Image (cartoon, grey):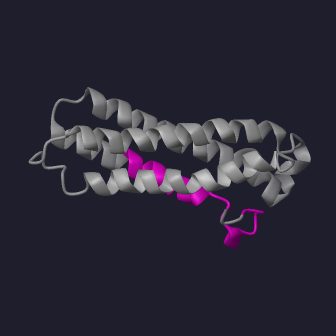
């Protein structure tokens, strides 16, 4: 189980960096003057792939982690509630937004709208992720790696 925990914590950085790269790549290109190339599609696709891999590892951990306790008393303990409800629900929402953004952008024909869609959905997803990560300074049992 420790391998999965370390993989989930380490993969977080690949997810955050790839999403941030896709967002930065889209900034300034929303006017439609720059074509949406294969490089742009790959930037968004790799962010999507990393988030889905992270989701799979997270779902496995959800059912085997000692931090997730399926009990009514878990709701009274902030750290247990965070892992049981808050972290998992917010991450699923963030990943769903990123998936929707990628799917919508893929179907659009206007290059500026593709960039704007990626920028909007990925930025909102990233914000939700940053809020729901158990950073060490939140005292929820999380670590940097």
| Residue at x 14% of width, y 42% of height | 35
Residue at the image point whose x is 27% and y is 26% from the top: 107
Residue 95 lies within the magenta run: no
Residue 22 in picture, x, y percent from top left: 35, 50
The residue range painted magenta reads 121-142
The quadrant of the picture occupied by the N terminus is top right
Q: Residue 123, position in %: x, y? A: 40, 53
Q: Is residue 51 above or below residue 131?
A: above
Compared with 125, 17 (above or below) is below
Closer to us: 87 or 136: 136
Asked whether 130 falls inside the magenta stretch, the response is yes
Q: Give the residue displayed 17% in from the left and 29% down from the top.
A: 109
Q: Residue furthest top?
A: 107
* Residue 128 shows up from this direction: no
Q: Residue at x 67, y 62 (%)?
A: 145
Examine the image and state in which quarter residue 91 appears.
top right
93 vs 48, nearest the viewer: 48
Q: Is residue 46 above or below residue 127?
A: above
């Amino acid at each position: 189980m420790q391998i999965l925990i370390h993989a989930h914590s380490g993969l977080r950085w690949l997810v955050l960096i790839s999403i941030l790269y896709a967002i930065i790549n889209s900034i300034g290109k929303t006017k439609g003057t720059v074509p949406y190339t294969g490089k742009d599609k790959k930037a968004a696709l790799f962010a999507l792939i990393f988030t889905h891999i992270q989701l799979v590892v997270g779902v496995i951990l959800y059912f085997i982690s000692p931090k997730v306790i399926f009990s009514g008393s878990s709701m009274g303990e902030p750290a247990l509630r965070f892992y049981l409800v808050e972290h998992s629900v917010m991450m699923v929402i963030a990943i769903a937004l990123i998936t929707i953004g990628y799917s919508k952008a893929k179907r659009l024909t206007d290059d500026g709208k593709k960039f704007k869609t990626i920028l909007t959905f990925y930025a909102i997803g990233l914000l939700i992720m940053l809020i729901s990560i158990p950073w060490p300074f939140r005292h929820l049992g999380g670590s940097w790696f």
